[in-house]
Amino acid sequence: MERTSEAYEKALKARTASVKLASTDAATRNAALLAMADALIAQTPRIIAANGEDMARAKANSMKESLQDRLLLTPERIVGIADALRQLASANDVIGEILEGRTLDSGLRMTRVRVPLGVVAMIYEARPNVTADAAGLCIKTANACILRGGSAANSTNIVMTKVLMDAAASAGIPANAIQSIETTDRSATTELMGLHGLVDVLIPRGGASLIKSCVENSKVPVIETGTGNCHTYFHASGDLEMGLEILLNAKLSRPGVCNACESLLIDEAIADEALSAALKALAGANVLIHGDGRSAEAAAALGLTEGQFVPATEEDWGTEYLAYEISVKVVSGLDEAIAHINEYGTQHSEAIIASDYDAIRRFTDEVDAAAVYANASTRFTDGGEFGYGAEIGISTQKLHARGPMGLAALTTSKFILMGEGQVR
Amino acid sequence: MERTSEAYEKALKARTASVKLASTDAATRNAALLAMADALIAQTPRIIAANGEDMARAKANSMKESLQDRLLLTPERIVGIADALRQLASANDVIGEILEGRTLDSGLRMTRVRVPLGVVAMIYEARPNVTADAAGLCIKTANACILRGGSAANSTNIVMTKVLMDAAASAGIPANAIQSIETTDRSATTELMGLHGLVDVLIPRGGASLIKSCVENSKVPVIETGTGNCHTYFHASGDLEMGLEILLNAKLSRPGVCNACESLLIDEAIADEALSAALKALAGANVLIHGDGRSAEAAAALGLTEGQFVPATEEDWGTEYLAYEISVKVVSGLDEAIAHINEYGTQHSEAIIASDYDAIRRFTDEVDAAAVYANASTRFTDGGEFGYGAEIGISTQKLHARGPMGLAALTTSKFILMGEGQVR
């Protein structure tokens, strides 16, 4: 571990800040969130100017239009970001909640209290809104944070972090509670991952390769988020029309998000009709189909071209396209469908279209995923849809938090025991 | 990752077993636990014979007496192990519990259900009782398990695992749900740590070096357990007599356990009297004192010898002795005590002896540990004392579980959403 690195020094400062931050009351933290919102509005010209530098670099580097759009800040967007902070200020506080308590046989008064994690590191892409969002979530939950945004947004992030930290400090939040890594050197990410003992949790919010790198290399505990190789499975008992509607919604409503459908499984018993209908609908919506042998026959019968259908490779079953593409496979039945999903899925969101009670029961029991659906689109896996308000991301791991994460995912608990001389 | 290793092949089988195991009902799992207990009793001669091989090897290798005692099985001890399994059978079931549920705005019926983690790997020392204990905890919570016990207990573990698995299978538990690593090759541990995606959690139960190695090298999520550099802090406002009683209990009642006191901090304001009394009591109980400069003066005044007092080094502040040794330091007051504990502690259990309300409040708020005590011995941090019954270990990390872990620590949750064609 590089003991003189920016990541190390900032983590050390964040750790110190986190001790005092943990003892702040909710009123102080909520006032800080409102001050942060006000400051973003008041400092809009300064933030837009910094964002302009990032945008100029992005254009010079011929950044993709969609990524440029994600990077761009406008006064309207800053109003939206500030509003999100204000909403957070009015959300229920989770810190200090007594999760359980009793008088032990020894006479000790025991309470288990919800407390902040301490220092949270977030690594994310060039999306300036995440900077304010992550800082806000951490202040709400009394965590210090170290933010590592995509380098393409670096000028914006530096200015926004300063604006947010100054505003929070003016409301009584300890200095250094909100920090961002300013170097664009990639080694800073590696350093962050090595800071076991200083950083309590690392939350990568981004693509599959970033998350994989964190899982494999981090000594700091990681919350895996967001990769979703989600399946829609047409069981023989399902309503085909409903299935097609759900499939198209899950694939097309927002192909670039993690809860979008990436793979279609169809029972052999209904393959003739269902495969033909599904391929026709998908191709009609300009979705490139990666299909198995049986699908190839159906595609040929439909007269699909090479731009519409290609044979699936082994790799396709495990691919999250995040695009107008899908893999399609015919399975012998429920057992094969469940086994296929458990082998190739990413334990995010999985759906069965069926009317058979036992099939739905077995699918929801045996498919190993954060969210399993019967007769609905996987697109519903979302903190807002599930009623959690503020969302930190969607956890695809099993420890600590699974599925859409609310504020409680940024907390842990502590036993407090009040005695009067008890010995054991 | 060695794709043909014993660890990989067993993990693959455990994964397959875990899918069916997750759908078993509590009655089946409890019947299996009783069958496992009966089988241990019925197969006592076979288990004792295997244990005899391990004991003979241990003696030939001049294993320490205390470790030999830990390794030894007797018919009486096997009765105790079987009784623990029977108690587990009668404990409340946690699987299938509905943790929350509501009808979403979309009309989806959402429930969040407690489900098994899937495949749990445990790495532990040469303690055959842990083999039955770990297998029992996993069957109770519908998890498949891969057990990796200390090589000195290998013959015992192989036989016990077979006896337990056969008995569980006879009661309806899927084959391969309970497995142990049979090779004594150390690389098997490394392989287990690499099986991200096959193994859901790795729980090391053992010494600090084992745990450190898992945290640093494992790609599988780890639950850190058991290292405890616990402090007892005499605040200026504390009752000295009570403090000494608590200190001696925390240090002496079982020095080899993780909740034993390893370091004493004393406020400067009371150092003259408290230091002298504490050093005298500790030395009188044959505890080797590693003290700071101020302690050295007190030790000299008391006439302590080199076998009773040595100057503390920087390393001492971070050392878990697990022996009749302690570090002693005079601090300027509450701030330094909290800062020292947060720097050198292992976030396990920490105690303040005080009568001042604000000092106790600040200590319990600002000390970052799983359990913080006012006026009681740190020795109470224990699943049994806290009322959790079966204990998996004491987590010293913040994610997923913190402090003594009960059965719920071996579970995760899954969202199940029942729809009728909902799209977003």
Image (tube, coloured by chain):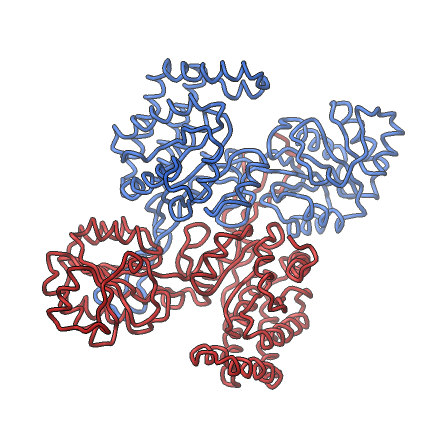
Chain colours: A blue, B red
B144 or B280, nearer to the observer: B280
> With respect to residue A180, does A399 lie above or below?
below
The quadrant the N terminus of chain A occupies is top left
Give the left or right position of residue A316, taking residue A3 as reference.
Answer: right
Most extreme residue toward the front is B306
Q: Is residue A364 left or right of residue A90?
A: right
Q: Residue furthest right?
A: A301
Residue A17 seen anywhere in this rendered image of the structure:
yes
The quadrant holding residue A311 is top right
Task: Classify residue A387 as left or right of residue B1.
Answer: left
**In the image, is residue B309 above or below residue A302?**
below
User: Residue at the location (50% across, 54% down)?
Assistant: B222
* Residue A52 position in % (x across, y down): 45, 14
Whether residue A141 is visible, yes or no, is no
Q: Residue at x 20, y 48 (%)?
A: B335
Above or below, A291 against A360 in this view is: above
The residue located at (33%, 29%) in the rendering is A33
Residue B256 is drawn in which quadrant? Answer: bottom left
Q: Give the image quarter of residue B355.
A: bottom left
Q: Where is residue A51 in the image (x, y as percent from the top left)?
A: 44, 17
Q: Is A221 positioned to the left or the right of A159 in the image?
A: right
Name the residue at 51% across, 85% down.
Answer: B74
- The location of residue A392, given as percent across then percent down, is 47, 36
